[in-house]
Image: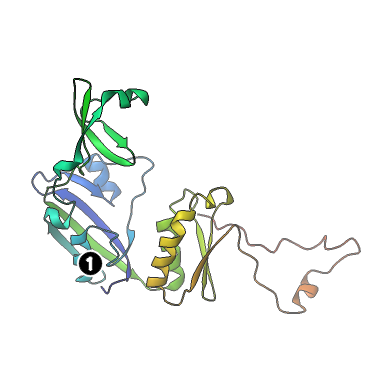
């Protein structure tokens, strides 16, 4: 696959030494391995090849694969989750956890200023937290398959939109000329504003015909030919009471 191709990918990741599954796009595999969560979404995911959407080793493999191909890839730590870093094992005063009403116990995953780590020990008023990824320093194995390459512009735009704005009610996209318009719920559009720049950058890279991105609350109805509006929506003396709303209903998902 060429760089910046958009593909739908299925995969399952395992620890090479134990064979334990730690990630998968398959609902069946998730249930079999104890990873299933009721609200989780399973199925192929969109990946921009060469963009760093997946582990470095997987990105390299995708560049050498074809549509429909399935491959087993073994990755060293340098191509997967990295080597363990001793500097990422930190000591935190127990009092800081108590201020946040957290009772730290070994194995608990905690948030330290935006970094997630796992509590290792609690002793003498001090808590040792490991901020390394649980899979750091480990060899892993992935079974990966390119389901298909996305070539249609509308489908590509919609998949990228859903990838960057993963909402419960799917965000909608529409290409108008050289502008990609993305419809987001008004109440959360400002919260998602920081994602607009990286989203726009990615869209322009994979869809050169797009020159800009706009966030909108709704899509305007397509303009009607001259005379057609008067023919289909006759005005009464009271105004345009007989006309219907021309805005399309939200797409059903």
Is residue 158 something one can see in this rendering? yes
Q: How many marks?
A: 1
Which residue is painted at 41% across and 66% down in the image?
201
- Using residue 246 as the reference point, say whether residue 164 is left or right of it: left
- Using residue 3 as the reference point, say whether residue 245 is left or right of it: right
Q: Residue furthest left?
A: 17
Q: Is residue 82 above or below residue 128?
A: below
Q: Within 10 Å of the Cα at label 1, are there few (<14), some (14-19), or many (20+) other Cα atoms?
A: many
Q: Is residue 226 above or below residue 42?
A: below
Residue bearing the label numbered 1: 62
Is residue 101 something one can see in this rendering? no
Q: Is residue 132 above or below residue 98?
A: below
Q: How is the image coloured?
A: rainbow
Secondary structure type for disc 1: helix
Which residue is painted at 21% across and 60% down in the image?
56
Name the image quarter holding the N terminus.
bottom left
Which image quadrant for residue 147? Answer: bottom left
- Using residue 86 as the reference point, say whether residue 8 is left or right of it: right
Which image quadrant for residue 162? Answer: bottom left
Q: Position of residue 51 (x, y in %)?
A: 30, 65
Q: Position of residue 87 (x, y in %)?
A: 17, 42
Q: Residue furthest bottom?
A: 226
Asked whether 230 or 4 is in front, the reply is 4
- Using residue 37 as the reference point, say whether residue 127 is left or right of it: left
Asked whether 69 or 197 is in front, the reply is 197
Q: Position of residue 98 (x, y in %)?
A: 33, 22
Q: Position of residue 141 (x, y in %)?
A: 14, 54
Q: Residue furthest top?
A: 124
Which residue is painted at 63% across and 62% down in the image?
248
């Amino acid at each position: 696959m060429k760089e910046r191709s958009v593909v739908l990918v299925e995969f399952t990741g395992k620890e090479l030494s134990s064979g334990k599954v730690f990630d998968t796009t398959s609902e069946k595999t998730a249930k079999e391995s104890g990873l299933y969560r009721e609200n989780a979404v399973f199925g192929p995911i969109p990946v921009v090849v060469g963009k760093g959407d997946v582990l470095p080793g997987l990105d390299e493999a995708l560049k050498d694969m074809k549509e429909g191909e399935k491959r087993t890839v073994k990755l060293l730590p340098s191509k997967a989750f990295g080597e363990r870093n001793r500097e990422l094992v930190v000591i935190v005063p127990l009092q800081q956890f108590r201020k946040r009403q957290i009772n730290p116990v070994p194995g608990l995953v905690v948030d330290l200023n935006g970094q997630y780590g796992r509590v290792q020990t609690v002793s003498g008023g001090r808590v040792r937290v490991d901020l390394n990824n649980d899979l750091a320093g480990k060899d892993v194995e992935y079974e990966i398959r390119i389901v298909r390459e996305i070539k249609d512009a509308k489908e590509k735009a919609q998949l990228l939109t859903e990838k960057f704005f993963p909402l419960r009610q799917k965000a909608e996209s529409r290409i108008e000329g050289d502008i990609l318009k993305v419809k987001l719920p008004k109440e959360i559009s400002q919260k998602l504003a920081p994602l607009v720049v990286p989203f726009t950058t990615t869209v322009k890279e994979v869809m050169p015909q797009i020159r800009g991105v706009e966030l909108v609350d709704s899509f305007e109805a397509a303009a009607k030919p001259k005379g057609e509006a008067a023919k289909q929506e006759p005005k009464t003396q009271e105004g345009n009471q007989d006309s219907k709303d021309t805005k399309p209903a939200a797409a059903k998902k």
